[in-house]
Amino acid sequence: MTAPSAPNGAAAAPARNAVNVREFIDAARLSPLQLRIMLLCFAIVALDGFDIAIIGFLAPHIRSEWSLSMVALGPLFSAGLLGLMTGAFLCGPLADRIGRRRVLMLSVAWFGAACAASAVAPGIGWLIALRFLTGLGLGGAMPNAITLTAEFSPSRRRGTLLTVMFCGFSLGSAIGGVVTAYLIDQVGWRGVLALGGALPLALVPVLALALPESVRYLATREGMQARIAAILARIDARRITADMHYVADEPEGPGSPVSQLFAPRYRMGTLWLWLAFFCSLLLLYLMINWLPILVQRSGLSLKEASMLAGLLQGGGVLGAIVLGMLLDRFNPYAVVAGAYTLGAISVACLASVSAPLAMAAAIFVTGFCVSGSQVCANVLASAFYPTSSRATGVAWALGIGRVGAIAGSLGGALLLSAGWSNAALYLLLAIPAVAAGISIFRVGRVQVAIGAEERDTTSNNPQDVVQA
């Protein structure tokens, strides 16, 4: 068994005492600490989903109070998406520099404070600005929750743990709708926004007390040996000895975390990941925003259309869990690429069905395959990059995905106003699903090439390392 030398020029301990922190985590049973980390990150993404969802439910009440036109609400929605995109681009590299834990707590505190401040916005201009600031925090929270969970998850269960954690987003979105429906008449839209800010602010001290820093990140920094040992002892104290020296999977790469995404071995994988995220979120956001209208144009009532559209999210939750378990058992890139391809077929089938039951089945399968695959794509992104640029890689892929989300939201409006038929739109939407599947498959080929290169490198530089 082999392991790289300590990063950043740290003095290496004798080879027999070197312990690869990833291998330590992989060899241990799942501990209460790891489950706690997953649950805390579940809570973070649930609050993320809650905050993103409530603005859509509150928009009619905001419009009524301020006598706004429908056009005036457009910037209110897009400001949040722009903030999410910007926050992802900024917070990913920051987390690779100062740690996942710090950026997570900062992001949660930031979006909580901005959401609470939105409750006292005096006008639509202020509210738009504050929704952008809220998006900045949300954009930093999600990718770092993914990264931290991934770095504490054993490889054999990473897909399952990450997809279950990410289901918090869907749960938070659903709770946002229920809470708004029950509270809006009692506290108004400002009270709901205040609650959306108070919940994450209340979570911050819990995170400060209960959330550890990633040991894989700490292993890339000097002077962290005692801190790493203390955290790993909470995973499996029986295997900790005083003479152990903890190392990361790989030395810290040269340059900034962003530049590492374009290092020769990662460049093509980065571009294929970005294309997959762009196409996947373009398709999802177009369907999330416009599917009720498309179904209503098929002759169903608005209530029936809303119920059928809800199957998209329901299928996505089940798809994320099932596909996540399959990631741990089979080739993960083949699983996700195949699911995207099946999703393309199901969305294309919507062009030729009109019976409500057939439409419901096609919508559910589309959500299962496409929305479920998007959750799994986060898992693949977290596994593709080295520790020194992992948070940046996940965050920037999500940031590019937000560009696709904006394009999908606006593109649906343009295509519908141009008179496109439902059948033509559904057939068109099959294209980004196919493109996402091809892109994920190509990422898998790049990953195979990287693995072969690493095996060649270690075979030329053998070092015997005792497995923890």
Image: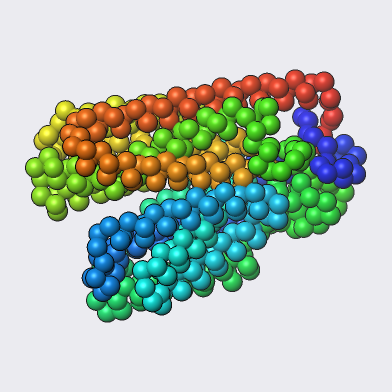
Residue 67 to residue 457: above or below: below
Q: Is residue 286 left or right of residue 109?
A: left
Quadrant, the N terminus = top right
Could you tell me which residue is drawn at 57 percent across and 49 percent down? 89
Residue 317 visible at all: yes
| Between 108 and 65, the one nearer to me in the picture | 65
Quadrant showing the C terminus: top right
Q: Position of residue 393 (x, y in %)?
A: 60, 41
Residue at 53 percent of width and 60 percent of height? 137
Q: Is residue 219 left or right of residue 410?
A: right
Is residue 430 left or right of 34 when viewed as pictured?
Answer: left
In the displayed structure, would residue 41 be above or below residue 123? above
The residue depicted at 39 percent of the width and 46 percent of the height is 406
Q: Quadrant of residue 110?
A: bottom right
The reply to whether residue 330 is in sight is no
What is the x, y in percent for residue 40? Answer: 53, 60
Specify the farthest residue to the bottom: 186
Q: Quadrant of residue 36?
A: bottom right
The spot of residue 363 in percent (x, y) is: 25, 38
Report whether 27 appears left or right of 163.
Answer: right
Residue at figure coordinates x 76%, y 46% from the top left: 220
How are the colours assigned in the image?
rainbow
Using the image as rendered, state which of residue 83 and residue 352 is in the foreground: 83
